[in-house]
Image: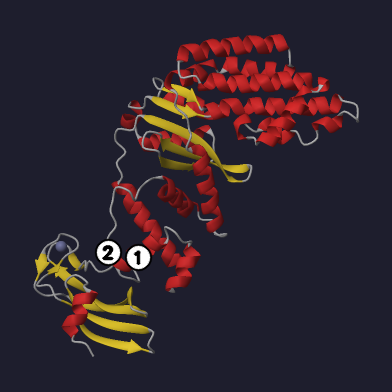
Amino acid sequence: MPHSHTITSFVGLQKHRVVRWKRHHKSWIELWLAYDGATYRCSGCGQGFRRYYDRLWMRLRDLDISRHRVYVWVPRYRVRCPQCGVRRVDSGVARRRARCTRRFERWLFRLTNGMTVKEVSNLTGVDWEAVKGAESRYILGLLRKRDLTGITDLGIDEVSEKKGHRYLTLVTDTVKRRVVWVGRGRDRAVLRTFFRWFGKQRTRRIRCVVIDMHDPYELEIRERCPRAALIYDHFHVIKPLSMAIDDIRRRLQRELPPAGRLYLKGSRYLLLRNRENLTAKQRIRLQDLLRLPANETLNAAYILKEDLRVAFRRQDPKRARAELRDWKRRVRESKIPELLKYVEMLDRRRFGILNFFKHRKTNGLSEGFNNVVKTIKKDAYGFHDWEYFRLKILRKCGRLEEASSQRD
Ligand SMILES: [Zn+2]
């Protein structure tokens, strides 16, 4: 058997000494620790005492040693403090009421970065509630430490929690590319909750907010930070145009005689995809399709769609504005009803679009966040715990762990 001093040195729990140990069935070890400090400090006021009032032995899970699971018996002391009465002494080894040591909790937290709660639970033999609890507490700690001063640019995204229904609102700091807040739903009240949490002082510093064209968001932002530039995310501006093209395709398909409908079969994908994302073969197919006399309208609409995308890529705001004006004129001349409706929408939302040309800010992160949320949802395997879900999103998209280095 190794000397107790040796074990103490590699078990290394602060201010504690290993006084006894036992190995069970080659698979787990129990260690008894004694407090090595000179004083017992009242957790209420911090005053030190020479003697303790009473103690209780706690059995806590600690980090494994080789292939052995380790349980430590740690005394939990109380002191009789003249000021506070009978108070517990904070040992530093574990949190109050925890069933494992602090460093074991930190270990669990690190494992949950790449594994699901269930996987960590299987690996460590700790029940999943405890794993989840450890992770949640750590995330909360990181959230308290994060720096939210100096945020000037916000992005507000809606993400669907389930396909097509149940939405989340993510507020991002677009400069530091991190999610700072997650709310449930996508109505005005959700955003109001955000601004209340964010505080008036920080809100006053907001210079611009990128949103999709979702009215409840817009109304609330105009009220809370009226001086900030409201910018429409250009992806969301173009998207309804793609939908309009699809509407045209469907209308034509209805109008064509049955024989002609064949031409449009399988064309949806080709039309909706951005041109640069098509393969050479697909481009040729699309070209052949659009060249057909029956598809003249569709061809005109498609060219208009690609031209608008070019206009949105212009770096010079003046040129972009001129191209947009010209584009609208061409649409009016084309008299394609679906596109006219789209132009109406653009006119109604002129300011957010012109602001985009001026500031060129987008919610480019939004797609990535969408995928992360879906993955988290999948990993959460059935327990509907909104708070945990929220924390997990902030952990994965909030860049919490970059600033604080994690050590055991
Ligand atoms: Zn005290």
Lateral position of residue 73 relative to residue 280, left or right: left
Q: Is residue 184 among the parts visible in the rendering?
A: no
Percent coordinates x, y for residue 77 in the rendering: 21, 73
Percent coordinates x, y for residue 186 in the rendering: 54, 37
What kind of residue is marked 2? Asp
Q: Give the quarter of the image for residue 167.
A: top right
Determine the secondary structure under disc 2: loop
The residue sitting at 77% across, 22% down in the picture is 291
Residue 39 in the image: above or below residue 375: below
Q: Quadrant of the N terminus?
A: bottom left
What kind of residue is marked 1? Trp
Which label belongs to residue 320? none
Pointer 1: what residue? 107
Are circles 2 and 1 on residues that touch, CB within 8 Å? Answer: yes
The residue sitting at 70% across, 20% down in the picture is 301
Query: Which is nearer the N-term, disc 2 or disc 1?
Result: 1
Label 2 environment density (alpha carbons within 10 Å; few <14, some 14–19, many ≥20): few
Residue 2 in the image: above or below residue 314: below
Q: Quadrant of the C terminus?
A: bottom left
Lateral position of residue 296 relative to residue 176, left or right: right
Determine the secondary structure under disc 1: helix
Pointer 2: what residue? 408
Percent coordinates x, y for residue 402 in the rendering: 32, 48
Q: Nearer the viewer, residue 3 or 323?
A: 323
